Image (tube, rainbow, N blue to C red):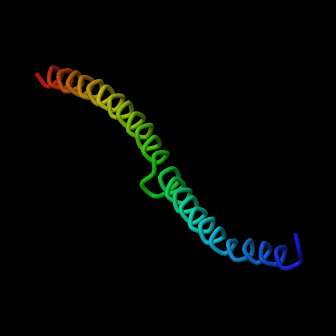
């Protein structure tokens, strides 16, 4: 192998590298875009984690509504009983 062959071989490798770099940059851009999209799906305003938080909040509010309905029924019964008692006193 002479010096010209070595030089041609090195120039051939150097010439191929920008194509490899461009290909790697394209793949890197695709992976970065996918990572950003996955991050948005997990932590964005309308993310999966937000959906889970809203489900928990909905369950808590539903149980609070049921408790308030029971309290309301109890207070209505008490008010009705008081009205009956006060109505009996007037007679």
Q: Quadrant of residue 21?
A: bottom right
Residue extending farthest to the front is 1
Q: Quadrant of residue 2?
A: bottom right
Residue at 82% in and 74% down: 5
Tell me if residue 35 comes above or below residue 48 in the rendering: below
- Residue placed most toward the observer, 12 or 91: 12
Tell me if residue 7 comes above or below residue 34 in the rendering: below
- Residue placed most toward the observer, 64 or 54: 54
Total residue callouts: 0
Tell me if residue 6 comes above or below residue 91 in the rendering: below
Tell me if residue 88 comes above or below residue 61 in the rendering: above
Answer with left or right where residue 86 lies relative to residue 9: left
Residue at 19% in and 27% down: 83
- Residue placed most toward the observer, 66 or 81: 66
Counting from the top left corner in percent of width and height, residue 15 is at 69, 77
Counting from the top left corner in percent of width and height, residue 90 is at 14, 25
Counting from the top left corner in percent of width and height, residue 70 is at 31, 25
Residue at 42% in and 35% down: 60
Answer with left or right where residue 40 lies relative to residue 89: right
Quadrant of the rendering where the N terminus is positioned: bottom right
Answer with left or right where residue 71 lies relative to residue 49: left
Q: Quadrant of residue 65?
A: top left
Quadrant of the rendering where the C terminus is positioned: top left
Counting from the top left corner in percent of width and height, residue 24 is at 63, 65
């Amino acid at each position: 192998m002479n010096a010209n062959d070595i030089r041609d071989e090195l120039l051939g490798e150097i010439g191929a590298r920008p194509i490899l770099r461009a290909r790697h940059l394209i793949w890197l851009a695709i992976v970065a875009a996918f990572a950003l999209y996955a991050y948005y799906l997990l932590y964005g305003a309308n993310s999966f984690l937000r959906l889970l938080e809203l489900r928990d909040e909905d369950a808590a509010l539903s149980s609070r509504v049921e408790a308030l309905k029971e309290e309301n029924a109890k207070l209505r019964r008490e008010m009705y009983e008081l009205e009956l008692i006060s109505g009996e006193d007037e007679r």
